[in-house]
Amino acid sequence: MTSLAVLSVASEVYPLVKTGGLADVVAALPQALAAEDVPVCTLVPGYVAVLAALEDGAEVHRFADLYGGPARLLRGRAAGLDLMVLDAPHLYSRPGGPYQDPSGRDWPDNAWRFAALARAGAEVALGRAGAYVPDLVQAHDWQTGLLPAYLHAEGGPPTVMTAHNLAFQGIFPAPVFGTLGLPPSAWSIDGVEYYGSVGYLKAGIALADAVTTVSPSYAAEIRTAAGGMGLDGLLRKRGERLLGILNGIDTAVWDPETDTALPACYSAARPAGRTLSKVALQARLGLDVQPNALLYGVISRLTWQKGLDLLLEALPTLLGTGAQLAVLGTGEPALQAGFAAAAQAHPGRVGCVIGYDEKLAHLIQAGVDALLVPSRFEPCGLTQLCALRYGALPVVARVGGLADTVVDANEMAAAAGVGTGVLFAPPSRDMLEAALLRTARLWGDRELWRRLQRNAMRTDVSWKRPAARYAALFRDLLASRAA
């Protein structure tokens, strides 16, 4: 098998900078691809935290002016990854998050901050930025959507556009086009133009050699008007060049047998440590310490997409079964306030932490009995994969990657011994309430629950199979280009 060098370009990477599952994928996939003889170099923006973590960073290229100031490409290592970092202080050295200022507003120059990232990726791919020249480029989400456009205009290796969530598309006013350095022909329905604006993700989907998204069901859903977020026609046009490849998780980071964030480690064969995590979590969140109470967890962005308004509406049903709820997340102010108010109104029954804490996320996965993901749409989801690994039965809407990763413990599945969680559809208050009642009945049969828990923990949620599919796709694209 011939080695194949891939340049992966993304706006975040765990653990250096993370706002969601994109960062986890960008960090874990290269490690899995290495086993397929596909070495990956990952290009990311030079945020302060990234530059601070970079080890032995050596300059490989310099830009005299990149959207308003000088910039450098550095190559080194961090968090076990081969990294290329775009050091452009005028674009990335600032307080706040990768995409928003400290007040939560989008940075007004995001169009150019991420055009610069795509431009730098194109320079590397075209062999203009030092000795490293990749065989193929993988671009992640709208922040890198212009990269296939640059390479389509100038030639270069094949490109794969990976869309993690179509809800975020990177749409900017038409005058931005004149600043991007693309040829006039790129302003077309087959290029970057999108209903009179510049569409970064649209450009990547239109001009990449192949498009992937993060689960087979989501790949089908986005071909429809209901799920395509305005891009369904283009996605249908891509035909067989649009593939759904399921995400995995880093099973070294998420491993209950070695997890130092837990009071005691455990496994499917030796599950006793879960009880200690449950008691520790109940104490941490001010819940009544009741090992026999059904404890649900939420680890999520608190948004409409995630269906968490439905959970607030269904809370009386959840509490009516005698269950408890532990929530960790941040997002829309109304939902933050709603869960904080629920915790205040139901002391000992509802616990809520607004924000994100990686160690607490691990403790929740290990301590809750069931994890709630009532999303209205979900490209893949990683939290339910972690839940399976940790023995927290996922209770999820039957959408996207949730439908692809959780086996519903209906009567026939439970009798056959193959269930791993509870699915419901459509994502509505009534159906969520029905799922909560069904989960409570399953909890009442402890022998069955333990069997489902073992099923969940033995599910392969690693990157092994997805990495093999990506490697096969990459090699197919190179072979097609060579033919």
Image (cartoon, grey):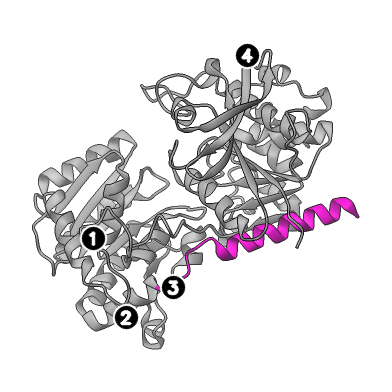
Circle 3 residue: 407
Q: Which mark is residue 188?
A: none
User: In what element is the residue under mark 4?
Assistant: loop
Give the mark nearer the N terminus: 2 vs 1: 1
User: Mark 1 to mark 4: distance in Å?
Assistant: 49 Å
How packed mark 4 is, by other alpha carbons closer than 10 Å (few <14, some 14-19, many 20 or more), is some
Quarter-of-image position of residue 454:
bottom left
Q: Nearer the viewer, mark 1 or mark 4?
A: 4
Quadrant containing the C terminus is bottom right
Front residue (pair 177, 72): 72
Any mark on residue 451, and which?
2
Q: Earlier in the sequence, mark 4 or mark 3?
A: 4
Q: Residue at the location (69% across, 27% down)?
A: 119
Q: Quadrant of the N terminus?
A: bottom right
Q: Earlier in the sequence, mark 3 or mark 1?
A: 1
What secondary structure is found at the residue carrying circle 2? helix
**Where does the image place residue 448, in percent across and percent down from the top left?**
28, 82
Q: Which mark is residue 70?
A: 4
Q: Eyeballing the image, is 60 above or below 337? A: above
